[in-house]
Image (cartoon, helix red, strand yellow):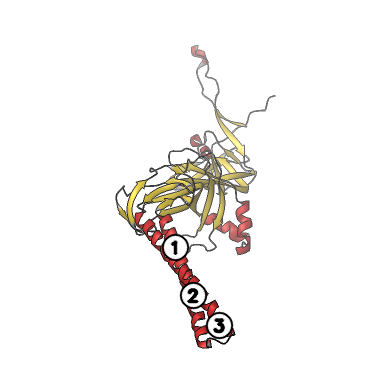
Amino acid sequence: MWAWMLGAAVGLASCGVDEPKETLSSFETMTVEKSNIELPYKFSARMKGQNDVTVTPQVSGQLMKICVAEGQQVKQGQTLFIIDSRNAQLDLEAAQANLQAALAQENSAKLEYESNKNLYEKKIVSSYMLNNSENSYKQAQAAVAQARASVNRAKVNLGFCTITANVSGVIGEIPVRTGDQVSPMTQLTMLSGNTTMYAEISVTEAIVEAMVKEGMNADDVEKYMANLPPATFVMKNGTEYPHKGRVVSMTGVVNAATGSLTCKVSFPNPDGHLYSGIQGTVVMNFAEQGVIVIPQFAVVRLQDKSLVYKVQSDSTATAVDVKTEDTGNGKDFIVISGLNEGDKIVTTGANNVIEGMKVLYPEETE
């Protein structure tokens, strides 16, 4: 709708000069209505792998081989490091020899016990001798079990000399070098399981208040998260990650200092483009129902006030103080107070309006 301001200028026709024509200045107006809009809520976030694992040795020894490079994508079970296994191999061989000796001792004790048992039934030996041989047999059995445990332990230690990836992911920094002496206190690298990535965010107080109004309790958390809108991850360079994320966890307690809830947003990472430590912004669009939305250029800033020119019934413009909220789309404001549905305001040209200026409307033509 176009509003027209009428102005006139007077000249002297008798002097042979053309009489100035009526000049018109235009302003665009709109009638305020309530509508529904999606507001992009933005949260600072840092990516973290679903399984970020610190890789350390289980045994001490010399690092013989590094089988991966920093930043390399690895599969679960893939060999990462190899530690000198010679001592572990010798320990295994010694444990196996002890097991053979224990088995021989068990066999001898068994034969003696069975022999004394037969002699006791024939009343040739006393019960004391039978009990002694039975105890010796049980001790030999225990020694065999202990020797088997030593063999298994030695096998495990030998296996620890080859360090494999327990999750699929990306290799982080490798601070060690081939030939270094390592121990269970040595960090070899960080393995980031990046098939799924988590962005940890703090949900704003406005959303917390909406949840409280809904009367959400602990049993409703999972249902609430399922109904939250999908999330978009925007990297620091402005690149938008193509896969959408979902909120998968939420703390049940509001932080008293910040008035926020901590949430984890899960993002699929099939191509491995996301890495642990990447910073960016998680964007979620939340719907606002029945709000007044006006273009930003309709708002005139005057010191600490936000003014909108409301068109009265006599076509004059009156400045109205309004409170607004940014929609985040770079174009519109939501009016919190100051305007009502059905009000008519000046939009384009609002900066040129003077308080009390009369606005005329042309006849509509088809």
* Marks 1 and 2, how far apart at CA: 22 Å
Q: Vertical placement of 278 versus 349: above or below?
A: below
* Marks 3 and 2, how far apart at CA: 15 Å
Instruction: Give the residue pinned by disc 2.
Output: 109
Name the residue at 53% across, 17% down: 19
Mark 3 is on which residue type?
Answer: Leu
- Does dot 1 land on a helix, a strand or a loop? helix
Mark 2 is on which residue type?
Answer: Ala
* 269 horizontally vs 175: left or right: right
Name the residue at 59% across, 57% down: 210
* Marks 3 and 1, how far apart at CA: 37 Å
- Does dot 3 land on a helix, a strand or a loop? helix
Expressed as whole percent of the image width and height from the top left, the position of residue 362 reads 63, 28
Expressed as whole percent of the image width and height from the top left, the position of residue 1 reads 62, 32
Q: Nearer the viewer, mark 1 or mark 2?
A: 2
How packed is label 2: few (under 14 Cα within 10 Å), some, or many (20 or more)?
many
Q: Vertical placement of 6 versus 87: above or below?
A: above
Instruction: Give the residue pinned by disc 3.
Output: 119
Instruction: Give the residue pinned by disc 1.
Output: 151
